[in-house]
Image: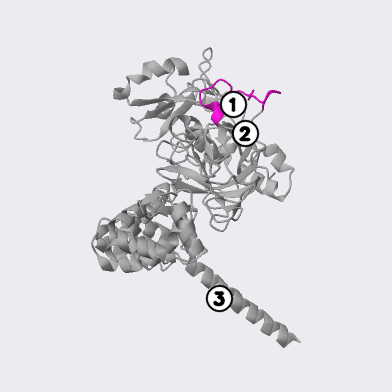
Amino acid sequence: MRMRWTFKWLVGVAVCFASCRALLAQEPNCGEIAAMARMARAKSSTTAAAERQKAGDSYRAQVVFAARSLELRLGDKKAAVLLLNLIPQDDGQHTTWMTMGDSLCDAESVDEMKSLGALGDRLPHDLARAVLLVPDKLPEYVAYAPTSVQDPHSDYAVQMQTVCRGKHAEFVKTVEGLPTDQRDWFVKHVLNPDGCHALALPEAE
Amino acid sequence: MEQASSAFSTGVPALAAIPQLAGNSRRGFELLASTSCLGSSFAISSNTLGLSTSLYEGDAGSRSTGKERDTESGNDYFEARYYSSSMGRFMSPDPLPWLDWQHGDKDDQKKFGSFISNPQNFNMYAYVNNNPLNKTDPTGMNACGTNSDSSCQVTVTIQDRSKDSNGHYNDQYTGVKGESNYNATASVTVNGKDAGTFLVKTTPSDSSSAATIANGTYSGTLTVHGSDLAIRLQPTNDIPTIGPNPSRSDGASMAQGILVHKAGGGNFTGVGSDGRPVSAGCQVVCTSQYGAFKQATGMSPSDGSAPQKHFTVIVDTQENTPQ
């Protein structure tokens, strides 16, 4: 009997340890957030790469690095692919994009929050730039639009106008390739591909 | 310390200080004046102390957002008590509820233990524990609202404005330019103490493209909104709305990314000429009161100390009630 309780206790501890580790791996700590903020305002790729080492391996850190890398190397297709591969695939990742400027730990400064918030605001612009460099990723880029514009502060549709104009034929084809209900919603509520006119506008600031 | 006192207090009544200080930037003072929902507001900062932040903010027309100077005594009115700028002391004891804490429950006892461990707390005439260079005391009570302290409970309660029998607003904001754009007020309390009340609009600028969030008690987190600060309501992805959200393809009665943030320029709350709404479901605070709102909630302490990062936001209005 005692053996069984000991076993159960050990299993419990192991499960708890595993889930705690998983949680810790997802949520960056204060030191990592500070590194991400430095990465977001890095003036060179070398600095960004150095901070990348300290920023941990969270999805958030990957997005910050990819976006800043593209900003620092505007025509770099590798940097573009890196960012495009991070287009949110689920609610958790979408929330990360929405909350770049949020307080994530008690010790971060407002300046750090503002650095990350500003980068978060630039993500739709960065992504538009990236997909113009790598149009193969248009399906993923277009598919995320209806989710992105649910955030009242997202200017995803406005930035998408540039892509629509720059790669019009490919863009129209991509939209036409969406499932019928999604395509109808897209052209009525997100962006009209004919005139490349954004319909989902963000709040004014 | 003496420098702080002299910079904090100019020795003239608040209203009279406006023209007097306006041309005084060479002496280290800067005056920022603006038109407000409540009248004219102003902020005085000092660069002689090497401080970039405001030392004194106020509203010339009201005591609710600033500290007025009593013209007869020369003392500053801090809602709960008067501050003597010449003595660097309050003129009456701090009415903190520490006596109640002593006889309260476990949490109160803990607060009391923490309170009595600091000898400066027994100098009830002190201003921010005699540390005016590093702290401010916006309410005259304590520095609680200016620190990111989990024991500091900052609550924003959004409720309907009062109306007369004809449906017209009849509160203290009546007649103020732009006030009719706001259907509610947000009362801020810090550990149960009033820290100010501010005009709020709780509904979207365009109800055909965004939903109104439902009444409820939400936790809030400090976030960045443009170049300013705001409060994000949680959960980020699942704020209930009072009907289907037109911005969602699935028609769910949910909204996401809802903030409490500043309204548009000139207290505007509608849809701009570029088609962009000031609110797509967010709770927007009167633009000219927003600086005072940030100070009251501790989001943006005037002394540059760590901001409050956790809030409780209660929405309880007619407009946000499901039909």
**Numbered range of the magenta stretch:** B163-181
Give left or right: position of B216 versus A91.
right
Which callout, 1 or 3, points to the residue nearer the camera? 3
Check disc 3: other Cα within 10 Å, few if <14, some if 14-19, many if 20+.
few
**Contact between labelled residues 2 and 1, with CB atoms less than 8 Å apart:** yes
Mark drawn on residue B194: 2
Indicate whether B226 appears above or below A167.
above
Check disc 1: other Cα within 10 Å, few if <14, some if 14-19, many if 20+.
some
The answer, for residue A189, to whether it is visible in the render is yes
The residue where tag 1 is placed is B79
Give left or right: position of A98 versus B179.
left
- The disc numbered 1 marks a residue on which chain? B
Give whichever of discs 1 and 2 has the lower sequence position.
1
Q: CA distance from mark 1 to mark 2?
A: 10 Å
The image quarter containing residue B153 is: top right
- x, y percentage for residue B254? 59, 53
Q: CA distance from mark 1 to mark 3?
A: 52 Å
